[in-house]
Amino acid sequence: MSMPPSPEEGGPRMARIRARALSPRGPQLVTPASARLVYGSLVLAYLLGLLPWPEGWRWLVPDFTFLVLLYWNIHSPHRAGLGLAFVLGLLTDAARGMLFGMHALVYVAAAFVALSVRRRLENFLPPGQALQLAPLFLGKELAVLLLGLAIGQTVTDWWSLAAGPMAALLWLPTCLLLHGLGGRPPAGPAATAPDK
Amino acid sequence: MATSAQAPMFMRVMGLPMRLALYVLASLVLMGVDARYDTLGLLRSGVASILHPVQTGLARPFHYLQDALDFFQAHGQLVRDNHRLQQTQRALMQQLHDRSLLHAENVHLRNLLGLALPPGYVGHGVEIVQAMSNPFSRKVVVDRGSLQGLSTGWPAVDDMGLVGQVTRVFPTSSEVTLITSRDQDIPVQVLRNGLRLIVSGTGLDRLLEVRFLDMHADLQPNDILVTSGLDGVYPAGLPVARVVAVEPPRHTPFARAVCAPLAGVGRHRQMLILQRQAQGAAPLPAGPAAQRVAPREQGRSP
């Protein structure tokens, strides 16, 4: 594929920019998610974590609450902010029998990162987002373990780090499901982006 | 900075980093308070008394499903299981018989020595509701709590031996820390020669270890370890573990012994929590669960 000469390169680009300005698309076209959907999905994710998962596979079970929290941080930041992350973290602490504040701290920090990079992430398709969020998911598990070690727990189960990549893999089905429920196009707002 | 009803996007006065700092500070304070003081116990027990019934409800369909699957298991499997279980039962009955004989003899000898009898224990039957997903220690939640009379420190056993210890009590549920938890240490005695040891959890389900073992200690594979009762927490004589291997010292002055827990730690759904009866009191049944197991307890105590 040969590159077009330089004067013509500006042509389609300008047309694209003009088209973007004339017909707004992406997040602006999507109606904001209803409070019922946001809080309902979070409650469901929390209950999912309480299910009696088989004992041998527990280390592989991702933190569903955290997954859905990050989704809403990125796609509906006016409903899911740091305060919600804090409350959910406390609930997770209670469910896992850990010190109050451990998960709250980690959730709030992760939500801060997600809120900071969400504008950039919205331009990617779910697989790209999963790839970029994978360090955040892994970092969350690592942060919980390191916090526990710092507090004085002597030994820990390093296999539970595997829940991080697992959560990154589950980002795709989560996006599909919540995009569908929230009235977005299934592949996300960036699906129509003409970039190569 | 003009704020108006038409521009809600300017209503946030505090920036994101500032709010992050506040929440991080709040988390750290909470962690400190929770680690040092007991003041958050009420909050925790409030949350737990809401969460644990929910967990029970969520687990119920899976239990039913499991029961249905069990029901449809193949006939041959059941026959084989039955055969094996009968053999185990016979062996267990033999052991129980031996044990009660020994116990009776022990009581007799104690009477002769003029020592005070150890007070009897009564059992509370409990069911495991949920295994906690906590990478630091192995805990389960059981369906009875302080309303049913449970209290922290009580030992939990199954039909094979010691399983764990009650470490937190909520109104209708309790947390039991299993003996395989890394921070659980149990004073034990070797059944064969009375050698006193301390056996510790490793964090793995099928493994316990004796960490600092004298390299000349008389400990052999297949030795049975029972609780010595010296700690005042566990009653004496509960089977705890079987020695699998004794490793000679490497780089340290101590040997190490690897043991397998005798009880089905992490395998069964039901357990028995032992309550020490007040000295001199008759073993009273404390509720329907206690009545269910009372005959067995009476058979065990003199």
Image (spheres, grey):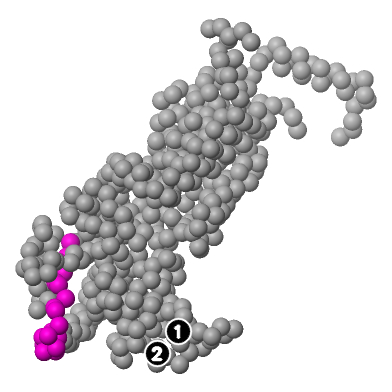
Q: Position of residue B117 (x, y in %)?
A: 13, 78
B172 w.r.t. B159: above or below: above
- Residue ID at (43%, 77%): B209
Q: Are marks 1 and 2 in contact (CB under 8 Å)?
A: yes
Q: Which residue is mark 2?
A: B219
- Residue ID at (55%, 55%): A150
- Residue ID at (56%, 46%): A140
Q: Are marks 1 and 2 on the same chain?
A: yes
| Quadrant in the picture for residue B282 | bottom left
On residue B213, the disc is 1
From the viewer's side, name the closer residue of A162 and B191: B191
| Quadrant in the picture for residue B205 | bottom left
Marked residue chain, label 2:
B
Horizontally, is B249 left or right of B210 in the view? right
Q: Quadrant of the C terminus of chain A?
A: top right
Q: Position of residue A10 (x, y in %)?
A: 87, 20
